[in-house]
Image (cartoon, grey):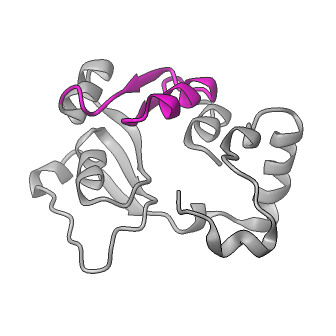
Amino acid sequence: MHGADGAEIRGAGRIIAIDTDPAKLQLATKLGATDIIDPRNSDVVQQVSELTGSGVHHAFEVLGHKETAEQAFGMRAAAGTATIVGMIPYGQKIELHGFDFLRERRIQASSMGSNHFRVDMPRLVEFYMRGKLHLEDWISAKLKLPEINDASPI
């Protein structure tokens, strides 16, 4: 489930999408993002702080990069959680300041969305059938099964 779709379904009041691709930012807005940030403009953590005043309750890192994982941790409000979804390369270390753990700030990982298939899949199908999940927007190309090995990565 896309972050904006999922956050909107869960009742998030403010959803901030961060990307360098204008098309992806436009799609995020269509899917429920209330604010967009292009990290090329200035420091991402500072931009999030300016938008929220105190940081976010939940930050999701989905690229698997050291820098974005550290940014996700840095943009949290007190008692906020950074969830690392992206696959950070084996051996790559993330650097965090110990002081940043004060005020019950957390970092955690998510594997396959930390889902519970028997409960979640029927709910996700229902969300899709009611038009709450916009899965078609994420299809960038269609291939026949014999062409699968020739597909380019995302």
Q: Is residue 131 left or right of residue 151?
A: right
At 53% from the left and 69% from the top, the residue drawn is 111
In this rendering, position of residue 68 left or right of residue 6:
left
Q: What x and y, as percent, mark residue 34? A: 50, 20
Q: Is residue 141 magenta?
A: no
144, 82: nearer the viewer: 144
Q: What are the residue bounds of the magenta stretch?
A: 13-42
Residue 58 at x, y = what percent?
Answer: 42, 42
Q: Residue at x 11, y 55 (%)?
A: 97
Residue 93, quarter of picture: bottom left
Residue appearing at x 75%, y 66% in the figure: 117
User: How many numbered discs?
Assistant: 0
The location of residue 27, given as percent across then percent down, is 58, 30
Q: Residue furthest bottom?
A: 91
Residue at (42, 35) in percent of width and height:
21
Q: Quadrant of residue 43?
A: top left
Judge from the rendering whether residue 65 lies leftward or rightward of residue 127; answer left or right.
left
Residue situated in front as seen by the camera: 125 or 98: 125
Residue 122: percent from left, percent from top: 86, 55
**Considering depth in this image, is 23 or 42 the residue closer to the camera?**
23
Check residue 34 for magenta coloring: yes
Would residue 44 be found to the left or right of residue 4 on screen? left
Q: Is residue 144 above or below residue 99?
A: below
Q: Is residue 84 above or below residue 47?
A: below
Q: Residue 144 appears in which quarter of the rendering?
A: bottom right
